Image (cartoon, rainbow, N blue to C red):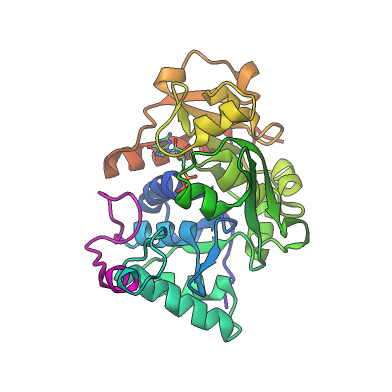
Amino acid sequence: MTAMRDLDGSVLALSGGIGGAKLALGLSHLVVPEKLIIVANTADDFEHLDLSVSPDIDTLVYTLAGLSNDELGWGRRGETWNFMTALEAIGGPRWFRLGDGDLAMHVERSHRLRAGETLSDITADIARRLGIGLTLLPMTDDRVRTRLETDEGWLDFQDYFVRRACAPMVRSVVFAGSETATPQPMLMRALAHPRLRAVVICPSNPFISIEPILSLPNVRAAIAACPAPVILVSPIIGGKSVKGPTAKMMRELGQTPSAVAASRCYEGLLDAVIVDHKDAGTTAAEHGAAVFPAHTLMRTLEDRRVVAAKVLDVADSLAGKVA
Ligand code: GDP
């Protein structure tokens, strides 16, 4: 069972994969594990070779456990590929790569899900076994799946993201199953807590990493009503994504890619946005939130810590001032 925690003074962060995990790691160096809750997007999850794959949870687990492959930008450090080589030799699919160590994660998760455990309990147990002390939660234990309407028709998320390498033009995005999914109960408890320290929206893709979390019943309203400061770290720096299709998707959805456009994805929710120094000229009126410039490109561990420290400073400076 996911442990009951005293949520007083806790930091709650909403995260996708790579961008989110960078800030989550920084926060994990500054906030005691008992007071840090990371909520992962699970709308990227899919079934491959009859295995349940949860890419954003796994990126967070590997990153927070110090096991991530920093050269590849995904998967595990020191990974070997015997399984893929053997699979390809007998005609198996090669478009989605599963390393040997990573495979263990998917096999174990799939088998435990089939035995009736929840994704929340499995994730908590695996995180604990890998030495992660903070609370890592899937956004829901129910099945939610991102589907994209593109110039090539409707695509499942991984078909768009991995098989087609984000090349198709996106027209709209839906989260199948989200209307009837139950948000993870600790997420809702934290948002309703009168003394939460901060809600952090990590620098993740707004359309496919954070919006699935916000689309769950009552989550957006709970964030809007949350007494804690809600702070975004912009995933767009100087009009560009650091990685991935965020800026490309903004253009395809009719927006000019910018830090302001990122904030506008969270209209009515934000108290503050941390933008890069490159975007320091943008105003609170444009963002709909107080603007705090910082160095937000997180290349090193120290960068991750500095951005996390800025988030906490901003949160504490706003404490008691937000509705
Ligand atoms: P995914 O689920 O693996 O695609 O990862 P996320 O959705 O969590 O992160 C993708 C977003 O993170 C992109 O919009 C990137 O621009 C952003 N991002 C990645 N690294 C950084 C960084 O160092 N600083 C900032 N500000 N944004 C970043």
Quadrant position of residue 134: bottom left
Residue 198 visible at all = no
Residue at point 54%, 36% (across, down): 232
Q: Does residue 298 appear anywhere in the picture?
A: yes
- Relative to 290, is 206 above or below? below
Q: Residue at x 51, y 77 (%)?
A: 110
Residue 95 shown in magenta: no
- How far from the left and from the top, in percent, is residue 113? 56, 79
Viewer-side residue, 25 vs 55: 55
Q: Which quadrant does ligand 1 occupy?
A: top left
- Judge whether 183 appears above or below 232 on screen: below
> Residue 230 location in percent, x, y?
61, 39
Q: Main secondary structure of the magenta part?
A: loop
- For image coordinates 63% across by 43% down, the residue present is 228
Q: Which residues are magenta?
A: 66-87
Quarter of the rendering containing residue 193: bottom right
Residue 295 drawn at (x, y percent): 36, 28
